[in-house]
Image: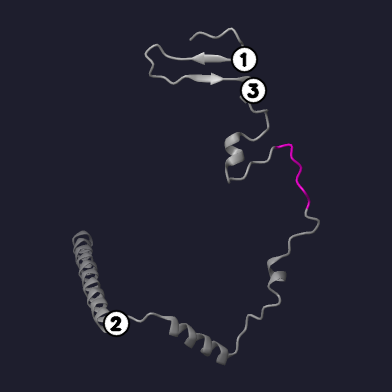
Amino acid sequence: MAPNDDSRESVASADDGDELLSKTIESDAVPVGAPSVAAQRSSRPVRKSVSAEVAKKGEATARRRAAHDDVDPRTTPIQFARQSVDELRKVVWPTWPQVKQYFWAVLVFVLIVMAYVGLLDLGFGWIMLKLFG
C-alpha cells in the first residue's frame, strides 16, 4: 500500500490483483448524525437520535373500558339464534366419503391408544405385584 501525495485520497491494492481497489475522498464523506445515502433511499424508518425531543400528546390515553362502553355485550336469545344460523351457513361441511374416511381414521387411532394404555396398565400392575405382592 502506497499513499498518494494528497492526504485526502488513498488507494489500496494487492500485488496479485485479487483485491478490489478502494478509494476514499473527503468530499464523499457523510457528516456525523446525517443519514447515510443507503438510509435516504431505503423505505425503512430512520432511528431518531438520543437528543431529539419527544412531542407531548396533551391528553392521557383512554382506558379500554371507556372505549368499549357504548357497545352492549348482551344479545337477546332470538338474536343469538339468528347469528348461530348465519355462522352455520358459512361452514364448509364434509362430504359423506370424507365423513367415512375420518370415522375410520379416528377409530383406528383410538384403538391403538387403547392398546398402548392397556399394555402399560398390565405392565405396571405386574411390576407392582412383584414388588409388593
| Outermost residue, bottom side | 78
Which numbered disc covers residue 95? Answer: 2
Residue at the spot of label 3: 27
Tag 1: amino acid: Arg
Give how far across and how far down residue 131 sits, in percent: 21, 59
* SS label for mark 3: helix
Q: Are marks 3 and 2 in contact (CB under 8 Å)?
A: no
Decide whether residue 25 is among the magenta residues: no
Dominant SS in magenta: loop
Front-lying residue, 109 or 47? 47
* SS label for mark 1: loop
Residue at (78, 51) in percent of width and height = 56
Q: Quadrant of residue 89?
A: bottom left
Check disc 1: other Cα within 10 Å, few if <14, some if 14-19, many if 20+: few
Front-lying residue, 37 or 107? 37
Tag 3: amino acid: Ser
Q: What is the distance, in whole Å, between disc 3 and disc 1 at their CAs?
A: 9 Å
Q: How is the image coloured?
A: one colour
Residue at the spot of label 1: 8
Tag 2: amino acid: Thr
Horizontally, is 54 left or right of 38 in the view?
right
Check disc 2: other Cα within 10 Å, few if <14, some if 14-19, many if 20+: few
Numbered range of the magenta stretch: 50-56
